[in-house]
Amino acid sequence: MRLPGSVVLWAGLLQMKRFLALTFMAMLAPAAQAQSWPSQPVHVIVPASPGSSLDVVARVLGERLHAQWKQAVVVESKPGAGGMLGMGAVAKAPADGFTLGVGFNGPVAIAPLLYRRMAYDPAKDLVPVVLTTSQPNVLAVAATHPANTVAEFVAWAKKQDGKLTSEALRPNIRYQALMLVTLFSASRTSAVPGRPRRPEAA
């Protein structure tokens, strides 16, 4: 079973208007004018732990942007609350066009479905800039498992009668994927609290 996962560069809605305007101006203007932005270091917030896949993406991207912009790109890891802490900081950043966030589906797409109250509204407070990476999520079992296909796994899950356990880390695409399997198999699972693991962007 393959479920899409993606990493997108985001910005606060107000600062995004300035960012897009300056970006298009830089594309159309002469080389001298194109260097007018960014005029100061750009801050990139990563809502995951240092060393996570999301952090790696941000730092590789930061190096490329630094070479192109001739301006410092400061990458800051701000993990917590399933990525909502970092993306909240992006949404509340000054509207000056110099703060971006490398987001993922958890705090942007999944969290609003799980929590009634959030410190930000992804649909209103954030705007996607560019898709940076995309990767699948794969359902895998041990070689000794009796299931060889998704249909066989679903049939096997139905026979477990509540014996299946799942990691209770939310918002998390792995958690959502398992919930889909549970829904399709009409089986029950027991949630087991777990500690966040790298990469948090998974």
Image (cartoon, rainbow, N blue to C red):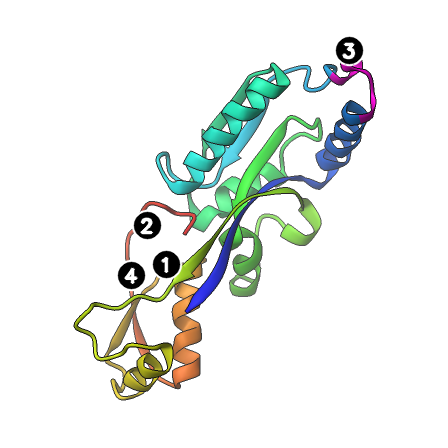
Q: Residues within 10 Å of mark 2 (few under 14, many from 20)?
A: some
The numbered mark at residue 193 is: 4
Question: Residue 91, percent across and down?
Answer: 62, 40
The disc, 3 or 1, on the residue closer to the chain's N-terminal end is 3
Secondary structure beneath disc 3? Answer: helix
Q: Main secondary structure of the magenta part?
A: helix
Of labels 4 and 2, the one closer to you = 2
Residue position for label 1 = 169
Q: Residues within 10 Å of mark 3 (few under 14, many from 20)?
A: few
The numbered mark at residue 32 is: 3
Q: What range of the chain is rendered magenta?
A: 28-34
Q: Nearer the viewer, residue 33 or 167?
A: 33
Farthest top residue in view: 32
Question: Residue 166, percent across and down?
Answer: 30, 68
Q: Is the residue under label 3 in contact with that under label 2 (CB below 8 Å)?
A: no
Disc 4 marks which amino acid?
Pro
The disc, 4 or 3, on the residue closer to the chain's N-terminal end is 3
